[in-house]
């Protein structure tokens, strides 16, 4: 198998090759490390690459495989994670200058579960500072660049997760999503992004940004990989009291559930009000594919999405400001201008408005489910409603227009984050600038299985996810 | 659009938090915050008196069962 063929494998595909003895773990690791070194000068997707440790782990995985000691479904598969997942005693920068100095206090549950499944973490990935920026700019570690065209943004905050998976320099990545940070890089970079229901995946040991909104999830090449990773990551955790305690479904087994008869909701308000024609056209084409697969498309009117977006802003800004208040007092110069400006304005939100934004969350979820999921099984929408901007175009720093620019990018992702619903971003074509775009499939609470089955069927009928950028 | 929040209030609240007033841009922050608060006001006014923040957790986990 050539390096190109090996790097084109999905994580699931590579795991099967390793299990069948056709690829050695060391071979996979050497190949991905070479590819990572090749693309890093152009894309800046990595923060730290652990060559020696990764190779040592790959050798150990080969020895264990030879002895019949298989560690799990990802035995020997190289992965990398957004640099905000803690490993006890090691540095997780959070894309920041401040956390560069602090050894992590514990190991993240998500990392521990991937370790247990046999994955080998070979690197940490670039990200927006403190996960608080949707473009992928980072003024401490350098801006992350899009694998399809290095002048364009990756989206953030899981910027390195998106671009390294797209560039075939990483088989799968751990990201996180507070207001779009998995779905945006998935859409801009052409990968799959899974944000499970709030409470499905433990956030313990993941750097917090907003406790009420943070979610942990994967960015992958295929929906099948996302299903496998979610099966590994999900489930109760005594260290995260928000976790659902009911048993986790086998999301891989559920991929085959029938699509015929599923009702797909096409929103008639808010979502397409400002959408570029190219985005609308791609979304209509993706709905045609779903119709051909046997789904029915129905119009739905999602209520109060703009209010949900505003409430998200109040909750996120308040909670982030609380987390950062001490450093804003003592080390303001160690933040970039944009992140300090955003964090500090959260200090000005009246306490009763923060509480009100949380009080309206339950009723908003109930109203949304009754209006939308009484008529359809899955809501279909774009992740973003306009073409990918360049890094220069979206370099707003901490300027007065910053919030308008950042708000436009997250206009369709923040409401879903606020409602706590699961969403799956799936590549759904290319715009006229030759950059990818994704559809966002939104499901009922804890019904990730339906989203994954629909995404899997869609990828079976399309080839967007098989196209690779020329980096 | 004029904001319902004054930049002076933003600066004062930063002072209360003991954060340097130039940590943010009070004019822009006032405009942004005013817009967010206006965005949620109708929904807040419709809330039941008894609605509490924990309602969301009950709602979303309740729908899992």
Image (cartoon, rainbow, N blue to C red):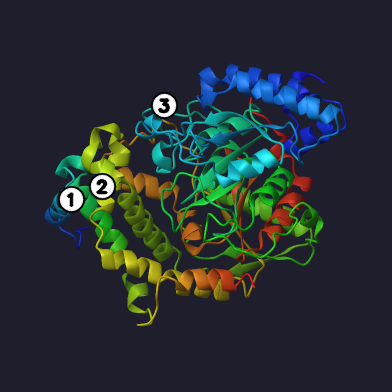
Query: How far separated are the C-alphas under marks 3 and 1?
Result: 28 Å
**How many neighbours does mark 2 have within 10 angstroms: few (below 14), some (14-19), or many (20 or more)?**
many
Q: Is residue A170 visible?
A: yes
How would you rate the neighbour count of disc 3 (Cα within 10 Å): few for under 14, some for 14-19, many for 20 or more?
A: some
**Label 3 lies in what chain?**
A
Quadrant position of the N terminus of chain A in the picture: top right
Q: Which mark is residue A141?
A: 3
Considering every residue shown, the one lying at the far bottom of the view is B49
Q: Residue at x 13, y 54 (%)?
A: B12
Under circle 2, the secondary element is helix
Cβ atoms under marks 2 and 1 closer than 8 Å: yes
**Which mark, residue A344?**
2
Q: For this rendering, which residue is in front, A283 or A67?
A: A67
> Distance between the Cα atoms at labels 3 and 2?
22 Å
A165, A271: nearer the viewer: A165
Quadrant of the image occupied by residue A58: top right
Residue carrying label 1: B14
């Amino acid at each position: 198998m050539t390096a190109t063929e090996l790097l084109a494998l999905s994580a699931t595909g590579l795991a099967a090759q390793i299990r069948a003895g056709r690829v050695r773990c060391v071979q996979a690791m050497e190949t991905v490390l070479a590819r990572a070194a090749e693309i890093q000068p152009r894309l800046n997707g990595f923060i730290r690459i652990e060559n020696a440790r990764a190779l040592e782990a790959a050798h150990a995985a080969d020895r264990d495989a030879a002895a019949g000691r298989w560690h799990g479904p990802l035995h020997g598969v190289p992965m990398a994670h957004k640099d905000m997942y803690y490993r006890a005693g090691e540095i997780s920068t959070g894309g920041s200058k401040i956390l560069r100095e602090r050894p992590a206090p514990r190991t993240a549950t998500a990392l521990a579960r991937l370790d247990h499944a046999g994955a080998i973490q070979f690197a940490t990935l670039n990200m927006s500072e403190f996960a608080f920026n949707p473009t992928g700019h980072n003024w401490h570690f350098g801006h992350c660049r899009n694998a399809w065209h290095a002048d364009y943004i990756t989206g953030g905050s899981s910027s390195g997760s998106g671009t390294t998976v797209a560039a075939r320099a990483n088989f799968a990545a751990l990201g996180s999503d507070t207001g779009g940070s998995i779905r945006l890089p998935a859409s801009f970079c052409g990968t799959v992004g899974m944000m499970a229901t709030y409470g499905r995946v433990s956030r313990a040991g993941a750097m917090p940004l907003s406790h009420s909104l943070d979610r942990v999830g994967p960015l992958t090449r295929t929906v099948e990989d996302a299903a496998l990773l979610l099966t590994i990551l999900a489930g109760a955790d005594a260290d995260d009291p928000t976790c659902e305690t009911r048993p986790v479904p086998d999301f891989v087994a559920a991929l085959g559930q029938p699509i015929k008869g599923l009702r797909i909701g096409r929103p008639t308000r808010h979502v397409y009000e400002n959408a570029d024609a190219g985005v609308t056209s791609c979304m209509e084409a993706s709905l045609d594919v779903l119709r051909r697969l046997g789904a029915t498309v129905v119009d739905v009117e999602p209520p109060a999405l703009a209010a949900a977006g505003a409430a998200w802003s109040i909750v996120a800004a308040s909670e982030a400001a609380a987390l950062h208040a001490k450093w804003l007092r003592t080390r303001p110069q160690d933040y970039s201008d944009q992140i300090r400006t955003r964090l500090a304005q959260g200090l000005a939100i009246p306490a009763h408005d923060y509480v009100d934004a949380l009080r309206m969350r339950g009723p908003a979820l109930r109203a949304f489910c009754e209006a939308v999921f009484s008529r359809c099984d899955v809501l279909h929408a774009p992740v973003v409603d306009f073409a990918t901007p360049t890094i220069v175009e979206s370099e707003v720093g901490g300027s007065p227009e910053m919030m308008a620019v950042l708000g436009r990018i997250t206009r369709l992702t923040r409401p879903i984050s606020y409602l706590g619903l699961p969403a799956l971003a799936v590549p759904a074509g290319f715009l006229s600038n030759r950059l990818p775009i994704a559809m966002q499939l939104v499901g009922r609470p804890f019904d990730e299985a339906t989203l994954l089955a629909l995404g899997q069927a869609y990828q079976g009928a399309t080839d967007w996810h098989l196209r690779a950028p020329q980096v | 659009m004029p904001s319902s929040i004054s930049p002076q209030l933003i600066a004062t609240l930063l002072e209360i938090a003991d954060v340097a007033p130039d940590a943010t841009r009070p004019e822009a922050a006032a405009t942004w915050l005013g817009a967010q608060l206006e965005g949620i006001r109708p929904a807040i006014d419709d809330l039941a008196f008894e609605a509490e923040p924990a309602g969301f957790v009950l709602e979303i986990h309740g729908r899992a069962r």
